[in-house]
Amino acid sequence: MELFDRFCPAAPYWTVPWNEIEEAFSWIRRLSGVIQDPVHHAEGDVAIHTRMACEALAALPEWRARPAEERTRLFATVLFHDVAKPDCTAIDADGRVTAHGHSRRGELLTRRILWELGVPRPWREHVAALVRHHQVPFWALERPDLDPIAFRVSLLARNDDLVLLARADILGRICADLDDVLSNIDLFQQYCAERSCLDVPRRFASDHARFQYFRTPGRDPEYAAYDDTAFTVTVMSGLPGSGKDTWIAKHRDGLPVVSLDAFRAQLRVKPGGDQGPVVAAAQQAAREHLRAKRSFVWNATNVTRQLRDQCIGLVAAYGGRVELVAVEAPPQVVAARNAARPHPVPQAVIDRLAAKAETPDVTEAHAVTFVDSTGDR
């Protein structure tokens, strides 16, 4: 990725140009002065830790041996791994410094920044997934849900990348339990290798087997679930102005469409108003198609996994096949299209949606289609 190539350490000195990085990125500058738990981060604030983690990554022989493109992507991931700590850091009632939720929020912030920078979706989502899970290898073997986490990372990014990120993270600290955590990271690496998901995507018997595995806690990942789906529901996802309606007209012409925009107009509900009646009306219309085992399109923004699951769970309950279609365009294109609408969505609403957007992935559906609608009219 050219944007980060010039900052990525290279032979023969493998030097991290920290001053240039701080000058280039405002989201790095805001890390300076953010305090951390002195027990696990005695090195100082988040900016100091991030610089030390970058230097630790640059010193790892296994990172230096990677192809240049992979080195750059991993280096960018280390730059981003604590990007949300300024928003999550607090001091609890006992005087302890905490940063609860910084991995989850860091994924969202990383995605938003890289989208605004024009970074291609596969590269962006790889980095965002690693940021989301960067603490998993530290205590992985204590988690009863490790399989679905490790499998999901293998499908969105790579677990061997997650291992290198975790090593750089812990080596970029001054903490008492360094050796114990490094040992845990090694165990996580071995675990992923044994589960056939270290440097390759986890394989499933079919897309239906994968879909059912991630929807059914405790399911055997080797189970070849019988596919009895008889119809398909296309669930759209994308910001207002991303191009969902245009895609539907071109690729799903003739299918019934359950559209939240249409119900908003019918019920006279503004985009920033109470969406409860709109969602209820859409679900009622969807159930009519589902009871008839009729394929249709569910058209809504659906920018979060939770919102999508309300649609997907209903379709799954009726035995339908789910195809997610994720439509996106650059911020300036979204803004221009929205402004050209007869009734534009308030920019504040779009900003809120963009801030919490989660790109659909293959753990949610039978299939995911990604659409860059930049050239569509």
Image (cartoon, rainbow, N blue to C red):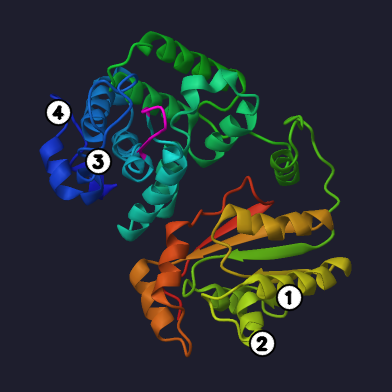
Residue in the picture at 42% in, 58% down: 355
Residue 15 has which mark? 4
Residue in the picture at 73% in, 42% down: 206
Residue 31 has which mark? 3
Residue where numbered disc 1 is placed: 281
**Identity, as a three-letter code, of the amino acid under mark 2:** Gln
**Identity, as a three-letter code, of the amino acid under mark 3:** Leu
Of the two numbered discs 1 and 4 on the same chain, state the one appearing first in sequence. 4
Residue where numbered disc 2 is placed: 266
Residue in the picture at 25% in, 37% down: 34
Q: Position of residue 317 (x, y in %)?
A: 82, 54
Q: Secondary structure at mark 4?
A: loop
Q: Which residues are magenta?
A: 89-96
**Identity, as a three-letter code, of the amino acid under mark 4:** Thr
Q: CA distance from mark 2 to mark 3?
A: 47 Å
Marks 1 and 2 close (CB-CB < 8 Å):
yes
177, above or below 60, in the image: above
Q: Callout 2 environment at 10 Å: few (<14), some (14 to 19), or many (20+)?
A: few
Q: Principal SS element in the magenta part?
A: loop
